[in-house]
Image: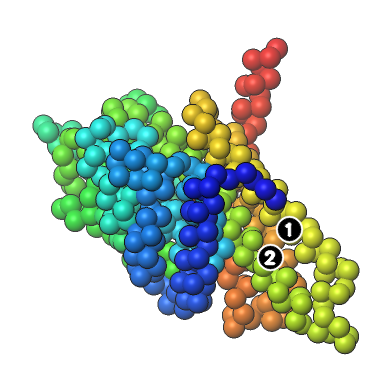
Amino acid sequence: MNYFLTEEQLMIKELAKKIADEKIKPVATQYDESEEFAWPIMKTLAESDLFGVYIPQEYEGLGGGTMEMCLVIEELSRACGAIALGYAGTGLGTLPILLYGSPEQKKKYLPDLGKGKKLASFCITEAEAGSDAGAIKTTARKEGDKYILNGTKQWITNAGEAEIYTVIAMTDKSRGSRGASAFMVEKGTKGMDFGKKEKKMGIRASATREVIFTDCEIPAENLISREGMGFIVALKTLDIARAGVGAQAVGIAQGALDLAVEYSKTRKQFGQTISSFQAVQHMLADMAIQVEAARALVYAAARTSDSGAKSVSKDAAMAKVFASDAAMKVTTDAVQIFGGYGYMRDYPIEKYMRDAKITQIYEGANQIQKNIIASHLIKESLKKS
Ligand SMILES: Cc1cc2nc3c(=O)[nH]c(=O)nc-3n(C[C@H](O)[C@H](O)[C@H](O)COP(=O)(O)OP(=O)(O)OC[C@H]3O[C@@H](n4cnc5c(N)ncnc54)[C@H](O)[C@@H]3O)c2cc1C
């Protein structure tokens, strides 16, 4: 399908595809098995300027937006959803600075992030605060020209690997959701530690760890925006990043579909290739429809985000839900097309199914996304009546 991408977007997509095919595909299984963070690939992405596609030119980036970020995530995820997450997680951790940072903060952090010299990480989730992000307990207490952070963030992508952490913490519990604030914390700050690397079902090459703050002192100038803006920073960040999760899901689904088509042309049963059976052909056709519909929604949400529209929340939630459900269905069907071989770890397809699952869960579980979509529908309808 033609999505009428600009020349520059096509070049970015091609470059990401080339790196995915030549550098990521050959090592994806190896990284899945070893569960190591793919630093050599991050270095390649950095040298290719891909971390800078959504960073404004005034901060030494390429000046694109959500669409460019999604194109890179999609192409990388086609080869490996886990390695792609090192890139996507940096986008998530960078967005609060991009959206709400002061000119000084942007000048200090964005050039290095855009050049891939530093990775980023976004920290909101805690053991008792997942979907209910308003229940976070991490605190940031102001003392003179410093904030002192205490608390533990859980399941943080890129934790331990990234240099820059954007952290949501409570500055005034008595104000409820208006009592949270957003901060930047640099790796190596005294009082900041990491938990053990989590062992996961899928996206195993991605790093997921706790981030632990014990009387962690940061300069007051590391506050992003104003006190009390923490959840607004987080919500706006996630609204944009969710198109990225959708893109990750589309990439994973497309990668699985490509493998299923190839396999169906070589596997013979009853004296013919399984691609000659109509039941298999229809499965492939249904998978292709799902992938394309998901891609169309993700690109539409990304374009809405880049248009400067007041809210991208409903579009991004729709794209994230549809694309992640499509990825789960398409990867499961791809395993089915591989039959028993699909269940074997010697074949690359089962990894796609394991990697797809997380896209239905993180950056707001799909049930929560449906709450967001429904609340928009009801509000829009009330406005009309
Ligand atoms: C691999 C991985 C990486 C992650 N990376 C990050 C990261 O980088 N930064 C970060 O801050 N967090 C991260 N997370 C956390 C992630 O965003 C949360 O796991 C997610 O938001 C869901 O929270 P929960 O796991 O606590 O599930 P819960 O909130 O306990 O939900 C459990 C189930 O109940 C459902 N549910 C909950 N409330 C409702 C409701 N009101 N209505 C309907 N259904 C509901 C959910 O949809 C879900 O199905 C990561 C998680 C994982 C697993």
Question: In the displayed structure, does residue 79 sit left or right of residue 121?
Answer: right
Label number found at residue 288: 1
Image quadrant where one finds the C terminus: top right
Say whether marks 1 and 2 touch (CB < 8 Å): yes
- Gap in angstroms between the C-alphas marked 1 and 2: 7 Å
In the rendered image, the residue lying farthest to the left is 144
Q: Residue at x 31, y 50 (%)?
A: 113
Q: Residue at x 45, y 41 (%)?
A: 65
Q: Which residue is mark 2?
A: 257
Mark 1 neighbour class, 10 Å CA radius: few under 14, some 14 to 19, many 20 or more? some
Q: Residue at x 75, y 73 (%)?
A: 337
Nearer-the-camera pick, 105 or 369:
105
**x, y (%) of residue 200?**
48, 66
Indicate the amino acid at tag 2. Leu
Indicate the amino acid at tag 1. Ala
**x, y (%) of residue 116?**
32, 56
Q: Is residue 95 visible?
A: no
